[in-house]
Amino acid sequence: MLARAFRRMGHDVRLIVSRRDPLHRPESRYDDVSFPYSGWVREIIFPSEVAYASRCWQREAAISELRGCDLVVLNDLGICLAGDIGRPCLAMLTGSDLSFYCNPHSETRVVASMTTRNPIKRIYGRWQWRRLLGRQRAAVRTSFLVYHFARGLIPDNDNLLDQIGVSDSQRVFFLMADVDEIVPNDVKVGERMRVFCATRLTWKPPALPGDSPLDFKGSDVMIRGLGLFWRRHGIPLDIQLVRKGRHVAETVELVNQEGLGDQVSWNDEMTQAEVWRQYALSDVVFEQFGSGLVTMAGLEAMAAGCPVIGNGRPEIIESLVGEKSPICQAVDPCGVCAQLESLVFDRRKREEVGRVSREWVLRHFAPERAAELILKKFASALRGSD
């Protein structure tokens, strides 16, 4: 998304695709990108995590490609290549690239996942992990910009960044939505209201070492709120859920406990383009109800003109943009039910919330705004080094 924004602004951009997972590839999102790639997109598949910290042709090819750039944007384990690239870097920390791959406590999960009983191989595996961890942390520390959520949103991650040695002047935070790609959604009239959950079904404690509060979406709050709406009004909904997340089985059980089994349709994991299609079909979209933030999933649903119900953390987002948020705020089942009541029974309200939501996202979260912010900070850093 950010790369395409830079291209629209006239910059020469290279994008390296390093995974085969469809959710990490642009063709699963954009109709105008196809495989095999040509032009500005290049595939260099890293065979394993270890490859990012080892001498292999994939690592050397990626480093060689990026050394010719003025500015390098790195995410995931690509961040640990920064030291060898030797160019000004923006480290985009969006989840496990910080909470897991920069967190020494994650070693317990790494060791627990080892299948070999050979003590020498286990020692070697731990050494490789510590080497990867060290490279990732060093790259984050020396990046001229570090993208992560605003200080105060995830205190554990703030502490981790402080321990690594990242200063507040290095940190930057913005949110983006693909507003140029998403067609606004017209309010539908069907036999049942269609609602779609845009987040993974991870909600049940305990957290594992390396987890972040952002990993937990409060999906049980959504299900219990839907159950409360059903018991109060006896109006069936068309509920679309996706088999993605750590607690799919637990969610199925909770759905049945709430008496919603015949209202729920289960979808297999889908491409991002298919998620956009769900927005176009949906009347209401659910986002996160945990202690995180409504991010790309919810913002892009809003860009499609869908009302979004979730814990929008208004104290965070409204401070960020300087304007009241149109997210339908809910933090518990009663709040979910109340928001459903206001949207299900009032078509004009749905239309108005959807319209205001799209306009709000267009004003604040176009990718070009993020690209402009990055370039402004990049130029300032260059002036400071003269």
Image (cartoon, rainbow, N blue to C red):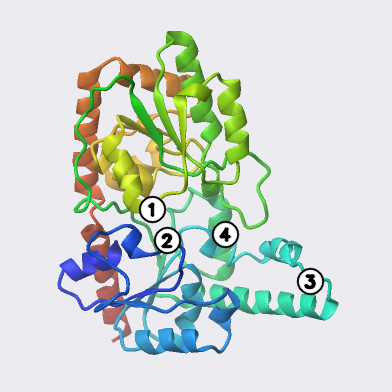
Amino acid type of the residue tagged 1 in the rendering: Thr
Q: Earlier in the sequence, mark 3 or mark 1?
A: 3
36 to 195, vertically: above or below: below
Identify whether 144 is placed above or below 172. below
Residue ID at (45%, 68%): 20
- Which type of secondary structure does the marked residue at label 4 adopt? helix
Tell me which corner region of the image, top left, top right, bottom left or bottom right, holds residue 354: top left
Find residue 91 and report its horizontal and vertical position in percent.
43, 70
Between residues 5 and 103, which one lies in front from this camera angle?
A: 5
Q: Residues within 10 Å of mark 1 (few under 14, many from 20)?
A: some
Q: Is residue 60 visible?
A: yes
Q: Position of residue 54 (x, y in %)?
A: 58, 85
- Residue position marked by numbered label 2 in the rendering: 22
Residue 77 locus on image (x, y percent): 51, 71
The residue that label 4 is drawn on is 99
Q: Earlier in the sequence, mark 1 or mark 4?
A: 4
Distance between mark 3 and mark 2 Cα atoms? 29 Å
- Kindly report the distance in space between the C-alpha atoms of the residues bearing marks 3 and 4: 26 Å
Give the percent coordinates (x, y) of residue 308.
Answer: 34, 34
Q: CA distance from mark 3 to mark 1?
A: 34 Å
Q: Nearer the viewer, mark 1 or mark 4?
A: 1
Q: Secondary structure at mark 3?
A: loop
Check if mark 1's residue and mark 2's residue have beta carbons within 8 Å: yes
Identify the secondary structure beneath mark 2: helix
CB atoms at circles 3 and 2 under 8 Å apart? no
> Which residue is label 1 attached to?
271
**Which residue: 56% across, 43% down?**
202
Residue at image position (23%, 27%) is 188
- 1 or 2: tag closer to the N-terminus: 2
Of 172 and 168, nearer the camera is: 172
